[in-house]
Image (tube, coloured by chain):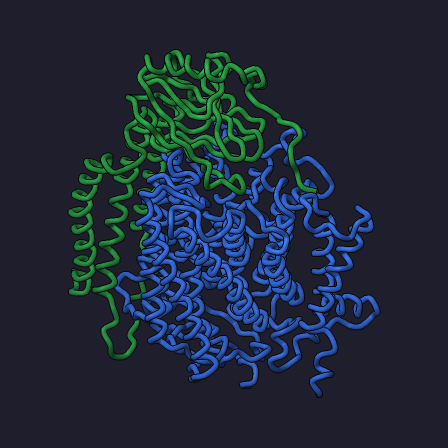
Amino acid sequence: MATPADKQREDHGKRVLVFTVAIGVVATALVAALGGRFLPPGNSSTQSSEQVLDNTVMLAIITPIVVLLAVFFVYALTQFRHRGGPLVDGPALRNDNRIQVLWVAGSAVLVLFLAAFGTFELLQNGSGGGQGPNPIAVPSGQKLQVQVIGQQWQFTYRYPSYGGMETSQLVLPANTYVELHVTSLDAIHSFWATELGIKADANPGVDNVAFLQTKGPRTFHVRCAELCGLWHGYMFNNGRIVPQSQFAAWVKKEQRDFAPVAKYLPKYSKTYYPDPQRRAG
Amino acid sequence: MTVARRLVGFNLLTACLLGIGGWYVGWYSAHAVVGPSLDYFGDVDFNELSIVLAYLFGVLGFLVGLGFLNYPIARLRGYPPSLREKETQGVSRYFGLCTDHKVVGMQYLVGIGFFFFIGGLNAMLIRTELLRPDHQVWPAGAYLTLVGLHGTMMMGMMTSGILGPFGNYFVPILIGARRMAFPRIEALTFWLLMAGGVILETTIFFGGFPTGWTGYQPLGTQANPGMECYYIFFALVGISMTLLGLNMIATIVTMRAPGLTWSRLPIFVWGVLSTSTLMVLAAPVLVATLSMAILDRTAQTNFFVPAQGGSAYLYQNLFWVFGHPEVYILALPGFAIVLEILPVFARKPLWGYRLAVAGLLGVSLLSFFVWQHHLFVSGINGDLRPFYMFSTEMISIPTGFTFLCGMMTLWRGRIRYSVPMLFCLAWFFNFLIGGLSGVFLSDTPSDTTTHGSFFSMAHFHYTIMGGLVFTFFAGIYYWVPKMTGFQLNERLGKIHFWSMFLMFNSTFFPLFIAGFQGQPRRVVTYPHGLQFLNDWVSVSAFLLGASMILFLYNFVKSLVFDRVPAPADPWGSKSIEWQLPSPVPVHNFDRIPVFSSDPYGYGEPGSVPVPAGAPAGMS
């Protein structure tokens, strides 16, 4: 036997639900379809494309949550406001097990999905993040090794397969798998190739490996993303991805230009300990 | 009593004099130990030990001057235990050691508020620099010091932002007690924080510090002597937090009035209890870590110096073992205040009490298992990243409990939009954005882009400023009428709320975009293409600062000039603190009250406000 009050209660719940589903479906579909165009870091490497997919999936998952809460609050705050007059108490609702179970189950499913999806994406090739000296997600095939050395306040790059040649600009061949070995000479830096979706901390005494598969030629930005002291804000540079033929020519030119000073470089190594290290005290 | 007699004795003036005296004792004694010269200024290789000892002796002198040794010495000499410090009257008790928990609460409110405004001022100066993409206003070192001062002051001081003022003031009242379990320790926590706040600001005399609030090594090892101020400040905060948490736990566990079972405890007290647990477990790690860092700089140990066998990862690990529970120490009291205030203004019982408690405890528990998400790209434990991704995302489940309980409390209520309620509702908006942006940071693949960028900066400002500071103001507007006995101006309060809410979002939402487009944190320069966004943010930030000035104006005007007496229960709450007169008498209750229900019985037939026993002075 439904009293008018029960009927009204049903209606409140139904209205919120209907609005949520209607707006939620449309909004989620829109985000899923269009999100990839606007979300970073773009489409310049396999890793960055994967991150765009990842960002799109997550944005699509949180969209229905946002819609639910938005509909709920707009509805509740307009419908259930105190409309003047003496202060009257609302109904003494203390609990509803069905809602609790639904809510907990819903959030648990979302969390499990997010964690599973994130792990799956991560284990493909490390999705551009620094994985430490013993990476768990190693893509197969041949890779070009490049060492990234952070120091206060610039990055330099060494190419062990070209005799440990050192350069101040990162130049990479197009459509190649690159194995980045990131390390530091002093403080902690973070190597961030913005458009390529690569970020790996440069720790002194640590060989931090990240994988990158380049696509077509372009320029990209490199910034330090970890506070590393006085001129941290100036620790940025441009890098280039060039066609493979140009890359070979570039290597030859660099080797020729820097041959006179090459002999002063330390021997190529995974990590370096410059001496003396400055310290306070 | 003459003014001269008042100035002699154990008070703030004596404390400052002894503090300065102690500072010089430490300074010169360290020089006597370490080196022959007394003039080390102007040299890179400054005598570090002298600064550390100067501040340690300074803090000791300060505490002695306040009279913290009087009681232990009196007991050693055979005098009986007493709470003599509580009996002083008048305004002067706010400027010294006082063991009345209500005085300490007021001290905390003003003291923390003061340093909160200083931290906010630093943020204004940072945003001034970022008006232009190129480096222009501050020298690079000064800019980094400002960033560090802002972050450290906010993270250090605001950890006690709610537990300090409202926890100390209201927890004993809410549980029907007359005092905290350890009243002198309660006073100590406050004065340690104040000493720390001053010490942190003095870093500018020693060249500042370049590390931000995280103090990463080995940058910290090579930094200016101003680094010591950071270490000592944060260590004092850690000690203060540990003691505060310990005191709260002891009070809540042992001093609840008859009938106040765990299932009748106000949700705010549950929030304080879970936060205190985090404080007691996490803060000692911080103190130990900073002590190791100080040893690295003074005694030439090598805990964090990689070239000598130390590890920079060790510092990062230890810091975040503290640091991640720390951010929940900031957030949880906000959850609790929201859930405490919503029932009053929705005129409904708190929905899902057990679920709400489970949410608070669940967040506390999980917060100890997520710290390495701060190190996703650092190269440490690459194979543990899936675990930390999962545990981090798990936290959204208990956080969701708080959302559900709050939302269902609003459902079919009679919502009044008073100022405290507006701040609580804003919490839902802000924390939703903060929490959902956290999903991008918890997911290891997408964290690669967002890590260390303005995205993460926007994220934690949404959770901490949007979560903690908004509820801090909710607490002020809600409880200050009880604490002072005077109303805050409602109209000015609403203007303050709307300007703060709009400008807060206008400040921090664009930062998500700036981060997505590649602006790292703590940089003094940024790409020219981001200037419009940054200018927008800077102007909004200045207006946000102006809204804080508006609050200050309201606060001073209402409490000092207008002084409109507040009724005992202005909000129609059924909770016990509102059944006492405003302001609450010194001994709270003449008879200890007996509880028969929780304070949320709105709309339940036969429910009465919690009988407050007979408040002091009324029987």
Provide residue B353's location: percent of width, then percent of height. 40, 58
Provide residue A221's location: percent of width, then percent of height. 37, 32
Position of the N terminus of chain B by quadrant: bottom right
Q: Colour of chain A?
A: green
Asked if one can make out residue B506 in the rendered structure from this viewpoint, the answer is yes
Provide residue B167's location: percent of width, then percent of height. 53, 64
Provide residue B511's location: percent of width, then percent of height. 35, 48
Left or right of A200 in this view: B344: left
Position of the C terminus of chain B by quadrant: bottom right
The vertical placement of A22 against B13, above or below, is above
Asked if one can make out residue B258 in the rendered structure from this viewpoint, the answer is no
Q: Colour of chain B?
A: blue
Left or right of A201 in this view: B408: left
Count the labels in the image: 0
Name the foreground residue: B606 vs B33: B33
Q: Residue at x 51, y 58 (%)?
A: B158
Q: Residue at x 25, y 63 (%)?
A: A77
The vertical placement of B176 against B238, above or below, is below
